[in-house]
Image (cartoon, rainbow, N blue to C red):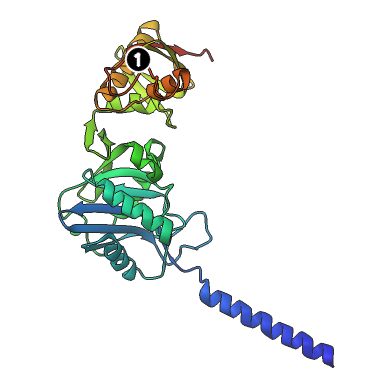
Amino acid sequence: MKQKKLRSLSAMLLIGWCLIFLRCETTEKSMVRALYLAQKEQSITVGLLYQAPEAAADASEASGAVQLQLAQADTLAKALAAAQKQLPQKADYRLCDYLLIDQDASAELLAAYERTVLENRQGRVSAKVSVLEMDDGFLEELPAEKQEFPNKLLEQLKQCADQMPRLYQYQDGMLLPQLRAEKQEVALADTSILWRVENSIELEARQAETARLLMKMGGVHTFWLEGEPVTVRRCSVSVTLREETASLRLDCQRSYDTPQPSAAQCEQLAELCTQTVQSFWQQGIDLVHLQQRSALQNGVGREKITIKNACPQLQADVRFLPM
């Protein structure tokens, strides 16, 4: 009899615990997939790209239509709180893989958001960052029902994810893909944005793609060389310093079922790499870490190559490995 009572009590406690757990940990949450930040004068805009209520909090992939919720306020905290308040369920940032900013987003705004992520977990410091450009009022004028733009935006973000740096890299500068939105459509622009704490610079496609190659960013890189496309699927970059000169060597693998690039094409890509390193150097950016390498080689304080001086003499050698 006593054992039956104990079993009944245990069962009731288990059921009660499960009910409490289900009450507190419902899987019906508004899963935030991307966050948009913009700043204009004294106003901050926050946009939450989310899925609900079909999205499960413990799912690696959320389902359901993507929707957009906007809010404006004079501080980031107020704007974010206002946007969250309008969501149908509690916001969950577990799948927030992307951060969209406008080209003029300040370092102070990104620093404030990074603190928010670390302190309140309203996002991820590993979120991939890109620029979203559009006309004033574009997001506010989207139809409230049957929005196609949010779904298209999320799909475009997934397609160009390999080109995006992560939020925690912002203090070192970021080379950001640029998305353009117009008439409920979104597309990857030919230009990219070199975002820095001091300012932002727009780069043409060829220079940006070369920079991504030298920075060893993932994805496939395509260049028009000698009038024909050459696609690089993998590349290792090595740097050798001799006094005040630097040699770059790129060992590349071309895409399958493509012809071996000619010597002239390799020379053109090498020249493009040299020009890109020099151009970034003039902007105060050491793209291939020449100063750090010089410090390791000669000792800190005795670098023969520093970003404050003119760009060192460069030589580049590009080779495509046989397949």
Which residue is label 1 attached to?
269
Q: Which of 138 and 6 is in front in this view?
A: 6
Q: Is residue 35 visible?
A: no
Q: Position of residue 323 (x, y in %)?
A: 54, 15
Q: Is residue 99 visible?
A: yes
Q: Is residue 313 above or below residue 256?
A: above
Toward which corner of the image does residue 22 lie, by quadrant? bottom right
Query: 10 Å neighbourhood of mark 1: few (<14), some, or many (≥20)?
Result: many
Q: Which residue is drawn at 30% across and 28% down?
A: 285
Q: In which quarter of the image is the N terminus?
A: bottom right
Residue 185 as seen in the image, left or right of residue 234: left
Q: Position of residue 307 (x, y in %)?
A: 31, 24
Q: Residue at x 37, y 16 (%)?
A: 304
Q: In this view, does 189 lie above or below 65?
A: above
Q: How many labels does the image show?
A: 1
Q: What element carries label 1?
A: helix
Q: Where is residue 277 in the image (x, y as percent from the top left)?
A: 32, 20
